[in-house]
Image (spheres, rainbow, N blue to C red):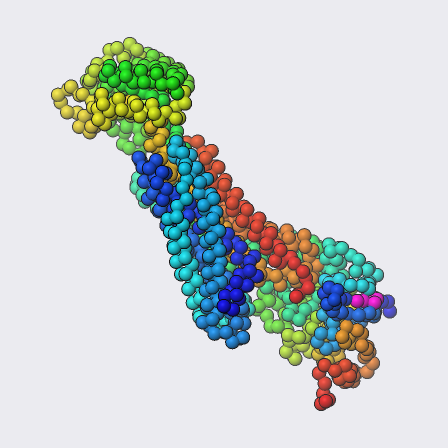
Amino acid sequence: MTNLVEVNHLKKTYGKKGNLYTALENISFTIEQGEFIGIMGPSGAGKTTLLNILSTIDKPTSGDIKIGGADVTTMKDAALSTFRRHELGFIFQDFNLMDSLTVKENILLPLALDKQPVSDMEGRVLYVTKILGIDQLLKKYPNEISIGQKQRVSAARAMITKPQLIVADEPTGSLDSKSATELLQYLTEINTKEQATILMVTHDAFSASYCNRILFIKDGVLFSEIRRTGTRKEFFQKIIDMQATIGGGVSHDVI
Amino acid sequence: MTLFKLAYKNVKSQFSDYVIYFFSISFSIMIYFSFVSMANDEALLAAASKSAKLDVALQFSGVMILVFAVLFMIYANNFFIKKRKKEIGLYNLLGMKKLQISKLFFMENMVVGVVALASGIVLGVILSKLFMLILLRMMQSDVTASFSFSMNAVFQTIIIFVLIFLFTSIQNASLVYRYRLIDLFKANSDGNKLPKIGFFSYFFGILGLGMMLFGYYLANDFMHGVELFHNDFFMAAIVIFLSTIIGTYLFFNAFLVVFIKMKMKNKKTYYRGMNLITTSNLLFRIKKNASTLATIAILSATTLSAVGGASIVYSYVSDQVDRTTTYDIVYDESNPAAASEIAALIAQNPDHKITAETEISYKTVEATTKNTVKQGNGEEVDDYYSVISESDYNQSIEKNKGGKKVQLENNQQTLLISMMYSDEFFDSPKGNSITLKDSNETFDIQDIATEAPVSSVTTYNMNLLVVSDVAYQKIKGIEPEYHYRAVNVTNAKDMKALANAIRKVVTEKVSENQRIPLQDNRTQTTEASAFNDATRAAYITKYEVSQEVFAVFGLIMYVAAFLGLVFMVATGSIIMLKQLSEAQEEIGRYRILKKIGVNRKEIKKTVYKQTGFVFALPIIVGITHAIFALRLASSIFMNPSILLTFLACGMFIFIYAVFFLFTARAYNKIVNGSMVQS
């Protein structure tokens, strides 16, 4: 397996001298092609900062990130926009759909921005919506569909450009448990069927149990890493234990 | 005093929101103050007292400004409060009583108001003199503006605006009581209903466009339009107004929505780059703001028409002065004593040198010709005419600035001079005949002119006939022939002293009202003699005519321009506030776009495009309305020069464009900021 993402000695600080706050300190890891990787950690651990930097919408103070061989920390603003458009797909906690666009328009937006031929776009939309089971909703507007469906539309938009990496920020955070399970199953399907590499930030152990591997961060440093070996249930138990070790997460042990 | 401090801090920290509001209010106060100052300026009033009711006009304009200001402030305040719903909720949660919150908002508004009032008055004091100079210039008055600072005006402005601020502050405070806590924390998700288009949208869309075009059609050929309404002038005007106004509302509410939806059907362009975002956002905004946009279109059409109309009238009047009074001084020579005294006055005056001089003789006849007014039935009309000879006419034209001389083909031909004639309302009388009542002699009208040879008031009637010298000799008038001398002098614009001296002579030697009645020696009463109580002026100076006319029309022009200015600024501010409040709601959307790979340049382009459309649509419709209205006005006023109209309207459109640029810039700044959510 080749490394899709390489993160080397990443550091991020906020504020000025004298009042310096270190959000991330010396973070290094790699993500392999086709992995479904989770990032967990208690509130304030630096999950969002890490995600923002990986998604190229924030810059690190030092260290570098290579995605598909390209060093994104040195790219200029305009180049980054194009890079995000082609190589990254985003799924957000609150869906971030444009409510002035129909489901179909929302999904093909990244392709339209790239000025691709209409027939290609429509073919691709049909393909991804079939996978995600939302092909009947194309003409609806976001406020006419359920939240579970909204998140699947968001997932469809994320994968429409066949990005190298799909970044999901708490994708189940706004969903009820049934919709969340559905979404996670779909993500797993995208991961296995489409060979899509997915990076998911979550603080929910159940969601995390769908991943192949999980990185734990605490107070800005990489705390540990666990890999799924057995069943999902066993993995879930391992995650819970790790959270208890870190503290601050949800624990079934009464302290 | 902590509440006051909080209010002060709030205003300071939200300065960027308040700045537009503050600017518009200060501007209104400044204009109001300068109008009131002028209304209180004794020297100015005394100078203009002759003809124009200057103080009344200025006070009336002041009231109009107040009405604008109050409406604008109420609108803006509603906007601010809505924007700060969450803040009210937060204060409430923190345990502030509603009374305290109301007090806070009350004080904030008063802080802004007092600062605006102070700066408005200071600016007003500085600029009043300039405004007064503009007014005097428009009135073509030679009064030297000795602007005196009026404490009275300051007090009046302060009292009135403090009252208005109190009123809007109370209104602000009362808004706080109207919200329930839960409402205050709800997101602004209202109004995102999607425009569905059905049969009715198409129907009303087409109807709206049709009504607007129908209004244009009627206005474009108004005299023909009037015919459609059985010559009911008033009815035709009302139909034009109503169909244009209703058409405008339907145009924005239905037609544009349908039009954009149709454009979306073309996937090749719609699914291309940012078009997807720009077009769909535009559809949303138009749907959401259709009525506001239509209102702005109509109001800006009204402003442009009023200002443009005033400048058309101003140009018309200034053309008319040139047309009716062609020489600087014209005086009657039938009273030799008075005439020689006037001649001496002119000759001995060191400030004015004679540059041209001519003499003209008139005979008065009664004659009948066909009425050529367009909607008339072409009946024969009986009236007085003044007759002059071809050589007198040509000489007066040649000695003056030189116009079109006449070459009559034979002794039976005549040149008709009618200052009321315009192609719009009259059929050309060329080829018609005119019959003298007493001699039964008939002339053929060879041509028509609209400019008096020396002056229009030196004859009994506005109608003149130019006949060949031979024919002139033969004509016997209904009273003795009379003569005028016409003189052009240097520095005619400042001949106040000379004009007054001439007036004095005429008043003493000729008649109290400086007019000479017609001596109709005939015994029987005719149609014309029964209808006309004819007199002619014993003298006329162009200086006095200009003074009188421009005192009135300069004032009208001035008032229209300044009211329009206040109005345009208020309109621009309202669109700006609305757009910027929408920008706040759109921050999230644009953040998504940036995340999924739209770069800043593309976002900037979209923002400018969208804001551009929102600003441009109403003004384009407004301008189109105004063009048709002004074309009609222009044709009614005999197509005067339209340079002034272009300048005036151009200035307003420029102001509006400046508002657009500021709004687009601010909008871009709001939505095109950092991607990382703070």
Q: Is A209 placed above or below A58 here?
A: below
Magenta segment includes A9: yes
Q: Position of residue B633 (x, y in %)?
A: 39, 37
B127 to the left or right of B474: right
Is residue B515 in view from this perspective? no
Q: Position of residue B222 (x, y in %)?
A: 37, 38
Residue sitting at x 44%, y 70%:
B178
Q: Toward which corner of the image does residue A26 lie, by quadrant?
A: bottom right
Residue sitting at x 69%, y 73%:
A170
Residue sitting at x 69%, y 66%:
A156
> B326 and A179: which one is in front?
B326
Magenta segment includes A174: no
Q: Position of residue B197 (x, y in %)?
A: 51, 59
- Outermost residue on the right side: it is A1
The quadrant of the image that shows the C terminus of chain B is bottom right
Span of residues in magenta? A6-11
Q: Position of residue B534 (x, y in %)?
A: 22, 26
Residue sitting at x 12%, y 21%:
B523
Q: Is B115 placed above or below A29 here?
A: above
Q: Main secondary structure of the magenta part?
A: strand
- Outermost residue on the bottom side: it is A254
Is residue B475 in view from this perspective? yes
> B206 and B661: which one is in front?
B661
Q: Toward which corner of the image does residue B137 lie, by quadrant?
A: top left
